[in-house]
Amino acid sequence: MDDQSLVYTLDDALTFMGFGKFQGLALVYSGLGWFAEAMEVMILSFVGSAVTSEWGLSSSEESIITTVVFGGMLVGAYSWGLISDSYGRRNSILGGSILTSVAGLLSAISPNYVSLVILRGLVGVGLGSGHVFFSWFLEFVPPSNRGMWMIVFSTFWTFGSVSEAALAWIVMPRWNWRWLLALSAIPSFIVLIFISFMPESPRYLCTKGRIIDAYNILEKIAQFNRVDLPSGSLISDRTTQLDEEFSTSEETPLLTSTTNKTTGFSCFLMLFSPRLFRTTILLWILFFGNSFVYYGIVLLTSALSSMQSKCSSPILLSESVQDSSLYIDVFITSFAELPGLLLAAIIVDRVGRKSSMTIMFILVCIFLFPLVTHQSNFLTIALLSGARMCSMGTFIIANIFAPEIYPTSMRSTGAGVAYSMGRIGGMICPLVAVGLVTSCHQTGAIILLGVVIVLSVVSILLIPFETKGKELSDTIDDVSNSKQALDVR
């Protein structure tokens, strides 16, 4: 800070410091948030049948237990996104984690069906803050290898799914679904315990004009990583105290905006500004298709691989939670996602986000195509495992792509609304795709998934941005400049 003629931006500082011990701890913390979300989502594979058996529910009442969680996630993704961009990442994560953990624990002692549905809906609303963990960690990672580290982050989802299957395998045969709900809430409580050690995103602080606070956090990160910050002063065009020569220099940082008072509904309206409208709509189609295909494959795996009947129940994997094959199937199929994540990590920073998603969607189609006709049980499971592997890759790359596209001032809002569109896909999928299979229309279900994949690929190709290796933008102007650069290429 001795030479006042030197200035640097937040991206300069992150690149200069590199990925160090602090980023490693941030990865574990934010990954724990996704781990907890995966456990709460995968619990739907085991609880519905047990509750139905105990309380004598109808099939529609059982389906509502699943649907209400996705409905809550839809509402939560939008709401926590607005809160994150208006009041900070920490506040959004805190609110979501409190709601998830408390409602999750209380649902274990639900006295009746109505209270269980209400509490699981609240759990869904809390889980809607999961994408904020993604945005928070993203804003600490240097741009050069951001895609690879975000893929590593995404493995926490897979491990959460595997852990839930293992936990259910241990708990359900010995106790009951209430114990499973209670124990599955523990990771969310752990997130709450460590939130006091989690700093606010310095990028968010810069967009609010709090440059000194952002610098203090960067300084603590540098000390923790045992490295130095760049020489000079952290700057942002928001700050009017800077010398005018810097605001007109070629070194003008990305932290630029006409206002730092962007809040609430205005963030949502900015999604439909002329510069972002096309991208927003295409992202919604992509996320809807991604979730529809991913959850469709997960549910079809259970329906098509059922050993009890040719056309099984739409309830995930099995009708009897006492059958150990239920837990084994979920455990094994969840592990199928790991090779997909590895492939995504290898190509995402090499060929770019759009090309990576296109390649992996094509691979999903290749795996699904033979299932247009009935295959042997072994081949069916193998093909669906391959499809799930690649579908997980596209799912995760899309989750990286959306926060990278939107500027910091509206990043969580833009990504949150896109995730909400994905939740709609997750809600509709069991009613449509799996419904076709259970009505003995396997060919129709596979063709439907193929059509959704084609629409998703088209939306990817029409998105006018590629974020590979680019610094995160902080204003709509920066997003526009990125588009112009892509058009030139």
Image (tube, helix red, strand yellow):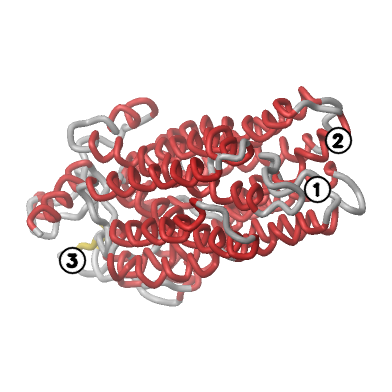
Other residues around mark 1 within 10 Å, as few (<14) / some (14–19) / many (≥20): many
Residue 96 location (% of width, % of height): 59, 39
Three-letter amino acid code at disc 1?
A: Leu
Residue 241 visible (yes or no): no
Q: Secondary structure at mark 3?
A: loop
Quarter holding the C terminus is bottom left
**Foreground residue, 402 or 245?**
402
Q: Work out how far the residue at label 3 is from the one at label 1, CA to CA, in angstroms.
A: 57 Å
| Residue nearest the observer in this picture, 395 or 155 | 395
Label count reads 3
Determine whether the residue tagged by mark 2 lies in a helix, strand or loop.
Answer: helix
Q: Which mark is residue 6?
A: 3
Q: Quadrant of the N terminus?
A: bottom left
> Badges 3 and 1: C-beta atoms under 8 Å apart?
no
Q: Nearer the viewer, mark 3 or mark 1?
A: 1
Mark 3 to mark 2 CA distance (whole Å) = 69 Å
- In the rendered image, the residue lying farthest to the top is 114
Q: Name the residue at 37% across, 64% down.
A: 147
Q: Pick whichever, 448 or 126, lies toward us.
A: 448
- Say which residue label 1 marks: 180
Residue drawn at (39%, 37%) of the image = 413
Q: Which mark is residue 53?
A: 2
Please report whichever mark, 3 or 1, sits nearer to the chain's N-terminal start.
3
Residue 319 as seen in the image, left or right of residue 315: right
